Image (spheres, rainbow, N blue to C red):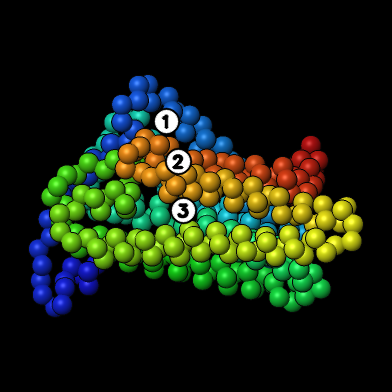
Amino acid sequence: MEFFNSALGKNITFVRPEYFIIRGFIGIPNINYYYVFLLCVYVVAVLGNTLVMVVIYLDHNLRTPKYVAVFNLAFADLFSSTTLMPKVLDIFLFNHHYIPYNDCLTFLFFCYTSLSMQALNLIALSYDRLIAIIYPLHYQVKVTNRFMLSLIASFWVFVIIAVLIAVGLLTRLSFCKSVVITSYFCDHGQMLQLACNDYFPSYAFGYLLVVLILWLPLIFILFSYSCIGYALSKVATAQERLKAFKTCTGHLSIVAIYFLPILIIFTFGTKRYPNARIMNLTLTSVFSQMLNPIVYVLQTQEIKESVKKMLKIRI
C-alpha cells in the first residue's frame, strides 16, 4: 500500500486508529436472538451451497456453461458466508466489538469482493438465458464452457482489483472524528464518515463501484429479460412460452432476492434509519446465500433430478 501512502511524491502522515468499534444495531432489545438466527442461516447456507457444488461436480450432465455459472455463484455465496458470518457472530455474540485497523481493512476487502461477485454472477446467468432463448441454434457456439470460465475469471480479476483500489484509498484517510462504525461489518460508506481529511477520492470511487457492480448489472439483467419477454411473445403457443420461461424462474428469483433490499436502501435513504440499513444489508449479504441454493434445487429440474439419482444410489 506504499503507493497510496504518498501523494505527489510527498510523504504524508495519516492518523490511523489502533482499532475500530463495530456497533451494529442501535437500541433494539434482545438483539442477540437475531444473531443466533443468523447462525442458523449461515449453517443452512454452507450446507446448501456445498450441496449444489457437489452435485454439479459429480454429475457430468451438469457440466454446461449455465452450471459453470451456477457453480461459481454457489462458490461465491459460500465464500461470502464464511468470510462474513463467523466474524459477525464473534463480534456480537461474544462482544468482541473492537477490531484492529488492518484487520478491519482486510475484513472489508473480503466482504466486498465476495458480495460484488454475486451481482456479476447474475450477469453471467442472465447472458446465458438471453442467448439460449433468443438464439437457441447458436447457443452451443456462442456460449461454451471456455467462454463462461473466461467471463467469470475476468469478473473475479476486475472485482479484486477494484476492491483493492478502494481499500488503498481508505489507507489515505485520517480517522480522528470517531472509531465507531454503525454497521455490522467494516462498511466502506460508514468508514468514510469517520474521516477528518478529504475523502472525496474514496467517496467518488465508491460511487463508481456502486454503478459498475450494482446498477449496470441490474440494467443489463432488466434489458436481457425485456429481450427475452419480447422473443417469447413471438412464440406460437402459450405452452412453449411457459416452458421457456420456466428456465428463467430460478435466476429471476435470485435477482429479486439480491437486488430488492439494495433498492430499498437507496430508495428510502440510510442516514435517518441506520437499523433499517443494517437489516437490509443483512438480507442482501446473508439471506441471499441461504436462499440461492434452495431456489436452484427446488426450481431447476436438472439439479432436482441429479439429487434424486444420487439419493437413490446412496440408498
Task: Residue at 40%, 52% (x, y): give it.
Answer: 111
The quadrant in which residue 15 appears is bottom left
Distance (Cα) linking label 1 and label 2: 15 Å
Q: The residue under label 3 is which amino acid type?
A: Leu
The tag earlier along the polypeptide, 1 or 2, is 1
Apparent side of residue 16 relative to residue 53 in the rendered image (left or right): left
The tag earlier along the polypeptide, 3 or 1, is 1
Apparent side of residue 218 relative to residue 209 in the rendered image (left or right): right
Instruction: Please tell me whether mark 2 sits on a helix, a strand or a loop.
Output: helix
Extreme residue toward the top, this view? 30
The quadrant in which residue 165 appears is bottom left
The quadrant in which residue 138 appears is bottom right
Residue linked to disc 1 = 35
Task: Residue at 22%, 60% (x, y): give it.
Answer: 199
Task: Residue at 24%, 50% (x, y): give it.
Answer: 193
Label 1 environment density (alpha carbons within 10 Å; few <14, some 14–19, many ≥20): some
Residue linked to disc 2 = 280
Distance (Cα) linking label 3 and label 1: 20 Å
Nearer to us in this view, 234 or 90? 234
Distance (Cα) linking label 2 and label 3: 14 Å
Q: The residue under label 1 is which amino acid type?
A: Tyr
The tag earlier along the polypeptide, 2 or 3, is 3
Q: The residue under label 2 is which amino acid type?
A: Asn
- Can you see residue 141? yes
Instruction: Please tell me whether mark 3 sits on a helix, a strand or a loop.
Output: helix
Residue 175 place in picture, x, y as percent? 16, 52
Q: Quadrant of the N terminus?
A: bottom left
Q: Quadrant of the C terminus?
A: top right
Question: Is residue 66 positioned above or below 89 on the image?
Answer: below
Residue linked to disc 3 = 115
Residue 63 place in picture, x, y as percent? 71, 62
